[in-house]
Structures are given as C-alpha cells and as structure tokens.
Amino acid sequence: MSDRRQFDVLVVGGGPAGIAAACCAAEAALRVAIADDNPALGGQIWRGEHSSPSSKEAAFWYQRVKDLRVEHLAGTRVFAQVDSRTLAAETDTSVSELSFRSLILATGARERFLPFPGWTLPNVMGAGGLQALAKSGWNVRGRKVVVAGTGPLLLAVAAHLREYGADVRLIAEQASRRQLLAFSLSLWRQPSKLNDALSLRRQLLGVPYLPSCWPIAAAGKHKLESVSVRRGAKTWSVPCDYLACGFHLVPNTELAALLGCVVENGKVRVDELQQTTMPDVYCAGEPTGIGGLELSLVEGQIAGHAAAGRLDPARRLFAKRDKMRRFAAALERAFVLRPELQELPRPETLVCRCEDVSLSRLREHSSWRAAKLLTRCGMGPCQGRICGPALEFLLDWKPESVRPPVFPVRVESLIATAVRTDSETMHNSALRS
Amino acid sequence: MRDAVQMKVNGVTVRVPRGSTVAAAVLLAGRSGFRRSVSGELRGPLCGMGICFECRVAVDGQPHMRSCQMLCREGMEVTLSE
C-alpha cells in the first residue's frame, strides 16, 4: 500500500528555485512540501551546505525554509502522475501518493555531455559531477584535474576544486575569446555577477584558461590517465587523474512534459506568473531556461506567491526577473556549441552509455524512434537524459514523448500506486509526440 | 576522523566523514570503476547528481542503488559488480 499525503502546494525539486517557491507559498500559511531526490536541500549549487552555508544568501534561505516549517521529503523521486492533482513518488524504502492544490516544478538542470573517444572511462566526469563528489566527501586534494567543456560552471568548478586542494592543470573552454568578452561586457550591468567572475579569476591565478580549446580524447587503461585537447591547429596531451567535463546545462523538463505542459526549444513555457500551460502547475528556475542562481530565486518566489494566490508580491518581482533574464540570454549566446564538436565522436564511440550504442549504429537510422526500437538507445536507466541532448546536437534528433515512469522505479512502486498507463494516457502522449 | 562512519566496500573497511555519499566512500576505497556496462566496460560516476545511473552499486544486498545520491551509514556493506 502506498502512503497518501495531502498538501496545499507541492514543490518538486529542492534547489534554490524550489526553496524560494516553497517559502513564499508557506508565508501564506499554506501546507507546503518539497519533494526532492537529493539527500539534503540545496540542489546542486548549494549541495552539502545545509549545515554550513557558504554564502549569506544560502544561509538566509536555509533558515527561512526551516522557520516556515516547510515539510521536506528527502530522497524522494516523483516518477508518475496518478491524476491531475496527485503524483506518485518513491524513496529507497517506501512509495507514496502526493496530492496538491497547486504544483510547482523546480526540477533544475543537468549537464550536457558530448561523446568523444574515451569519455566513458572511469574518472571522466561532469564538471558539476566532480564538484558534487567533492562536496559529498570525496577528497580531491593533490589530484590532477583538467576542467573542460563550456559555460560559466567551468570557472566555478575549477575554483572550488582548487579550494579543496586539487591541482587544476587546465581549463579548456570551447567558446571563443570574442564570445567570452561579449559575455563579460554584458555583466557590467550586473555588478554582483561581475564581482563573482572577477573573484573566480583571482582564485584561479596561475591556472591556464584557454578559450577556443576543447577535449578531443581521453585515454587510459582501466581509468583516465590523460586527456588530449585541441586549440586551433595544435593538439596536445595533458596527464591527469580526473577530467571534469560538461558542455553547459540542459533544463530538466521530463516531469513537466509528462504532465502535459508545453515544452518549447527545450524549455517549459510559462506565463508572467510562472504558470505552465497546465492550470495550477507552475515552473521555476532552470527548466524554464538556463539562467543561474538569481533568476532561479526570483522565479521561485514569483511561482510561490502566485501558487498561494498572492499576485501583488509576485508582480513586484517582475522587473528584477526581467533583468536576470537578460543575463540568461547573454549566457545562451556566449556558450553556444561550436560545430567542430560534432566531429568529436568516432564511428565506434559510444553515445548511449546505458545500452552501449555506438555512433555508427545510430547513423543507420533516420530518427530517434527508429533507433530506439532497433538499438535500445535511450531506453536504459537514464531514459535518454544523457544521450538525448548529445543526439540533438550531433544528429538533430528531437526528444521523444515522455512516458511514465519518468525515473526507473521498483515494480512494487508501480503496483502500489494507481498510476495510469491506460489507453487515454497513451493516446495523449502519442498526440504530443 | 572525528565524526566518521565505518563501512565496507567489497569487504574492505573504510572510514568516511559523516555525511559522505556512498560514491565518495567507493572512491576512498581506491576504486574508480563502480560497475561493468552491458558490453563489459568499467564505469564510474559521471553526473554526480542521480541522473546518469553510471555509479550504481549494491548496498546491503539491494542492487542498482545510485551511490551518488545515498549517504553512508555505519556498518553499510557496498558491493561493486565489477
């Protein structure tokens, strides 16, 4: 039997957007819960900081969410919809049905990974991936690390790893110096972000930060031993223990899509109150477009107020959100992927890591649907979350429709919850595809 | 370690700071390959945040647990399938 819980407002995702949303909804004396997959609140950016926040901002929100008695459902994965006002979720030991009057999706983002020879070797990780491990008890002191890919996360990760004692050998940024300069200029209008950027550069004194430079191969016998990088016509090899490599971020839109919310260009469509195209379903933070911490916090607050029916405090935040959205637009322009990266994987390079499907096997097919049926690409436990964004970039294959469960779950969980997999849901998902 | 948890990774005892994830404990035990892929390749953590499922291990006999999202507990027994 599943456990049934009832809330006024349910927030899915416990990062900054989810915390801000939950707090603003809870201020209206509503019963609010945050369901989050992670062991503690804070999402990835504040991972490991719940007991010792590193910034005033994080400390403020952790205190607020505690004071407002927002219920925290930790280690809880939402995997399906039971009906329009109920979601099914499981933990490692239990299954529950979470009902709500309003729902706020704050499901965050993940790193975009691009396949290149050797990218499946142990110790080749995401940039945020290695940072998450360092925040979770793994001691990187003295380890040689190459940070590569694209996006502002690279500098933040490199600075953080260095602070933890890692020996950061190189930061390889695929964006050009001209793009980076244009991005830096856009920060003049946002002094706090400019300060962040300057202090990161200070922390990274002595570490080469090369624009127009990217990894072309990782090598090693049982684990990573070196990474080859290219810059212009020059290629060279850098010995290292870890490659922390991510190509900016992609919004997590799977749950929104499952609920029938319109997703356009990889982003959940929202109105000015952060409401999706489904009534009483709101979305805040990275799923509406990658915009960073401040935009996530302000979108979360707007969604929280709106979900509680308090429109005036929500509207007072619109101007701030507009300003932050300009930063998001600058981000998107600055870290666009260069076409040369499409040439990184060789025919034998694996693209789908769950089912070990190579690029050459995928090239035999014309669409993801055909490839899925014949190669099982995207049908493993990550459900295409890793290979999907890569295939969109490499072969221009668009994501398939989303079907329940959105996360692999125990069979008992499916049985215990009245998850609809009837003809109506199937029909709806077919229509959306 | 003042506030440590003692546990086992493939029978080897490791002590990790309280609050560490199982993935950190496996790395601390000196293992970078966590599992074998369907074609037999060694794999370790990639995303570090519960999305990619590359860091799956068995914990106290329960298979396919994402080690990056699970906190270490005293006496926990982790088994790598590689």
Image (cartoon, coloured by chain):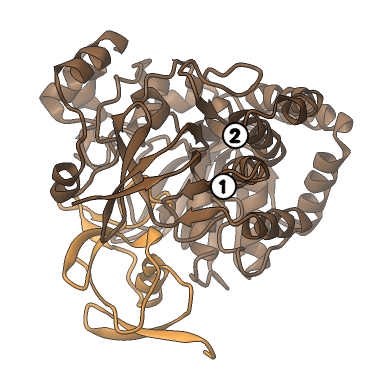
Residue A258 pos. (x, y %): 34, 26
Q: What residue type is disc 1 on?
A: Gly
Residue A333 pos. (x, y %): 66, 21
Q: Is residue A395 above or below residue B42?
A: above
Are circles 2 and 1 on residues that touch, CB within 8 Å? Answer: yes
Badge 2 marks a residue whose secondary structure is loop
Which chain is disc 2 placed on? A
Q: Is residue B22 above or below residue A301?
A: below
Q: What residue type is disc 2 on?
A: Gly
The residue carrying mark 2 is A285
Q: Colour of chain B?
A: orange
Q: How many marks?
A: 2
**Viewer-proximal residue, A114 or A86?**
A86
**Viewer-proximal residue, A155 or A253?**
A253
Q: Colour of chain A?
A: brown
The residue carrying mark 1 is A15
Q: Residue shown at 13%/22% (left/top)?
A: A373
